[in-house]
């Protein structure tokens, strides 16, 4: 068995109410994944999004006008600050 199968079996052993609670609480339990999951939903959504497209086009145009306004990111930019 692999870890995913173990997790699926453990979740399947929960009562429906406990599974619902777990599903509801997962974003709070794994906050670092919540943003990634949200972006994946956005990126894979086949529905046209005029507002998102316009925003990306505007940022792209600004980058072409002034690339220096977009400094390169460093790993430390992603560290949590308390």
Image (cartoon, rainbow, N blue to C red):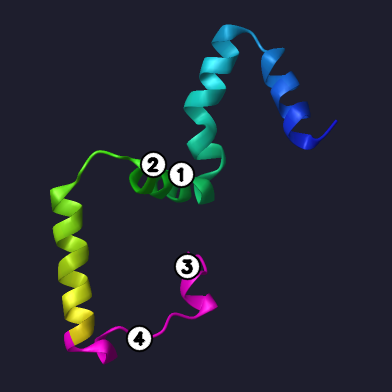
Residue drawn where x is 52% and y is 47% of the image: 33
Mark 4 in CB contact with mark 1 (< 8 angstroms)? no
Residue drawn where x is 47% and y is 50% of the image: 36
Q: Nearer the viewer, mark 2 or mark 3?
A: 2
Mark 1 in CB contact with mark 2 (< 8 angstroms)? yes
User: Which callout, 4 or 3, points at the residue further toward the start of the chain?
Assistant: 4
Q: Circle 4 sits on which residue?
A: 71
Q: Which residues are magenta?
A: 65-82
Q: Is 47 positioned to the left or the right of 40 in the image? A: left
Q: Is residue 78 magenta?
A: yes
Q: Mark 4 and mark 1: span between their CA atoms?
A: 26 Å
Q: Mark 3 and mark 1: span between their CA atoms?
A: 22 Å
Q: Circle 2 sits on which residue?
A: 41
Q: Secondary structure at mark 3?
A: loop
Q: Which mark is residue 81?
A: 3
Q: Circle 1 sits on which residue?
A: 37
Q: Is residue 7 magenta?
A: no
**Mark 2, other Cα within 10 Å: few <14 / some 14–19 / many ≥20:** few
Q: Secondary structure at mark 4?
A: loop
């Amino acid at each position: 068995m692999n870890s995913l199968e173990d997790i699926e079996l453990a979740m399947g052993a929960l009562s429906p109410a406990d599974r619902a609670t777990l599903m509801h609480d997962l974003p709070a339990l794994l906050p670092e994944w919540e943003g990634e999951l949200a972006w994946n939903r956005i990126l894979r959504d086949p529905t046209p999004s005029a507002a998102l497209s316009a925003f990306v086009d505007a940022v792209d145009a600004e980058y072409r006008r002034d690339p220096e306004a977009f400094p390169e990111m460093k790993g430390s930019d992603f560290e949590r600050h308390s």
